[in-house]
Amino acid sequence: MPFSVTGYDDTADSLYFQPPLTTVAQNFDLLGKRAVELLTQQMAAPPGADPRTAPHPI
């Protein structure tokens, strides 16, 4: 039965896994920076303001 495996952190070792492993890179510095920006905006916004989403490149 064929199947796929997906992982996170885009490790170099994933090149050698069997079955092949698809990985997703995560930029933690950018995610942290954006989280602080969104939190700061949310704290400054009036009650009931529209929520915001943080787009993440795929």
Image (cartoon, rainbow, N blue to C red):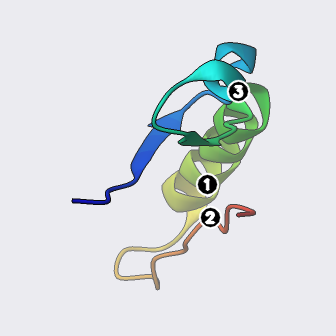
**Residue 32: image x %, image y %?**
66, 32
**Residue 42: image x %, image y %?**
52, 59
Residue that label 3 marks: 15
Q: Nearer the viewer, residue 13 or 54?
A: 13
Residue that label 1 marks: 38
Under circle 3, the secondary element is: helix
Residue that label 2 marks: 54
What residue is rendered at 68% in x and 61% in y? 56
**Label 2 environment density (alpha carbons within 10 Å; few <14, some 14–19, many ≥20):** few
Q: Is residue 42 above or below residue 28?
A: below
If the image is split into quadrants, where does the C terminus sit? bottom right
**Label 3 environment density (alpha carbons within 10 Å; few <14, some 14–19, many ≥20):** few
Under circle 1, the secondary element is: helix
Whether the residues at callouts 2 and 1 have beta carbons within 8 Å, the answer is: yes
Give the mark toward the camera: 3 or 1: 3
Identified by mark 3, the residue type is Leu
